[in-house]
Image (spheres, rainbow, N blue to C red):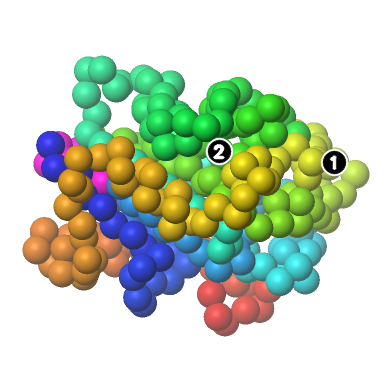
Amino acid sequence: MTVYLFDQSASQSMTSFSPFAITDVFTQEAGETKNAFLHFWQLDRTLILGMKDMRVPYLQKGLQSVIHSGYQPIVRNAGGLAVIADEGVLNISYIFPKSEQLRLTDEAYQVMYQLTKEALPELVIEAFEISDSYCPGTFDLSVNGKKIAGIAQRRVKNGIAVMMYLSVNGEQQRRGELVRAFYQSGLQEQFGQDGYPPVNPDSMTTLSQLLNTEMTVDQVKGRFVALFDDPTVISSLSDWLDQRASADLYRTKENSMIDRNDQIKELLHDNSL
């Protein structure tokens, strides 16, 4: 099995929707070819909403609170709840074909959990829900009860994408306050109810805070890459898509994301999305 490496943050001409389109293309490719992908990506000062977040009763007020904090809201093509993306957060997707050993959801989550423990051996990382973090889930990764990462999963045909956001450095307290403000504005008196988390900014931290040293995103990438035996680097996404006749699929997936975000654009009267 070939493992391909694609670092989106090193690529040019990427939109906010590109990582989600790329994930779906890679996941379908993994299912068809039985190869795997390690995909790194970042966005600039973005609140990534889940589809459930779009159903808060005061959505426009919630979105406006995000804009006032200097972040851009978008909605992804998957469930779950809101997470932050910025220069201190690394998103890591490990994408692989479904197999007899990896049929169940928890089994696939365990793959990313084990990779993270191997990449960060100096930390004792546990997996359990941090209920007052943003986007809480069974496979929240934490150290001493403080969440550092959240894991989600997406399946396309016979491919599985396990996607993690990892707080490497930066102001995690401020990230938590921003997400809490979105829910407080969007839910008002219903804050913390109906499956929306009562976000407590103190429930999360970063690798740099835990290690008491400024860890960089590039250092973390290097640790994950080192876990794989000579992965094949995708240096040009457009060339790779053309070689596999997947450019149309990519455009279809990206256009689907654009359409999905029309509601945000209309509510904010924002033509930049």
Nearer the camera: disc 1 or disc 2: 2
Across and down, in percent, residue 108 comes to 37, 27
Label 1 crowd (10 A; few <14 / some 14-19 / many >=20): some
Residue 248: x percent and y percent? 21, 65
**What is the spatial separation of the Cα atoms under label 1 and label 2, in whole angstroms?**
24 Å
Quarter of the image for residue 247 reads bottom left
Q: In which quarter of the image is residue 133?
A: top right
Ranked by sequence position, the earlier of labels 1 and 2 is: 2
Callout 1: SS: helix
The reply to whether residue 59 is in sight is no
Read off the residue under disc 2: 150
Magenta residue span: 31-37
Q: In this view, does 254 lie above or below 24?
A: below
The N terminus lies in quadrant: top left
Residue visible at 40% across and 51% down in the picture:
221
Can you identify the residue that label 1 sits on? 190
Image spot of residue 253 (x, y percent):
33, 59
Confirm whether the magenta stretch covers residue 19: no
